[in-house]
Amino acid sequence: MTAAVSYDDGLIQLDRQALTLRRYHFPSGTSKIIPVQAIRGYKTESLGLVFDRFRIWGPSDDPRRWLPLDVWRPIKSTLIVLDVPGTRPSPAFTPLRVSEFVSVLDELLHRE
């Protein structure tokens, strides 16, 4: 594993220590920081054509998920939903570069 394992697209930052979701909390717009060790897993889903795609901030069409502010979500296609024990609603977000984000997250979650 290289020393520079990280991802940052301006709204989502991921490194060895934590995943930071900027503009997460409503209405303050503060970040949510999730330690990488707390992430049990994740799943990727295609964004719905109506509800999640045009939900800019807040609960998704599934009230068990929370979406950080992302004004570019309507032009994105993939939703990442995290499995973080003890965190409800589950953080869900739309990375700008999905394959790069998933690659970095997989590497960080499978380290021993």
Image (cartoon, rainbow, N blue to C red):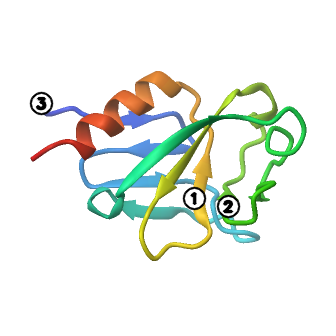
Tell me residue 2's x, y (percent).
Answer: 13, 28
Query: Which one is nearer the viewer's eye here, 112 or 68?
Result: 112
Tell me residue 33's x, y (percent).
Answer: 44, 63
Q: Which mark is residue 1?
A: 3
Quadrant location of the N terminus? Answer: top left
| Picture residue at 50% right of the left edge, 72% below the top | 87
Marks 2/3 in contact by CB < 8 Å: the verdict is: no
List the residue tagged with mark 1: 91
Q: Would residue 46 appear left or right of 21 to someone viewing this image?
A: right
Mark 2 Cα-neighbour bin, 10 Å: few <14, some 14–19, many ≥20: many
Of marks 2 and 1, which one's residue comes earlier in the chain? 2
Vertical position of residue 57 compared to residue 70: above or below: below
Of marks 3 and 1, which one's residue comes earlier in the chain? 3
Q: Quadrant of residue 44?
A: top right
| Picture residue at 90% right of the left edge, 38% below the top | 50
Vertical position of residue 25 compared to residue 17: above or below: below
Of marks 2 and 3, which one's residue comes earlier in the chain? 3
Could you tell me the amino acid type at mark 3? Met
Q: Quadrant of residue 36?
A: bottom left
Mark 1 Cα-neighbour bin, 10 Å: few <14, some 14–19, many ≥20: many
Tell me residue 71's x, y (percent).
Answer: 78, 40
Q: Would residue 110 appear left or right of 97 to someone viewing this image?
A: left
Q: Quadrant of residue 111?
A: top left
Secondary element at tag 2: strand
Secondary element at tag 3: loop
Could you tell me the amino acid type at mark 1? Pro
Marks 2/1 in contact by CB < 8 Å: the verdict is: yes
| Picture residue at 73% right of the left edge, 69% below the top | 26
Marks 3/1 in contact by CB < 8 Å: the verdict is: no
Q: Which mark is residue 66?
A: 2
Gap between marks 2 and 3 measured at Cα: 31 Å
**Residue 29 visible in the picture:** yes
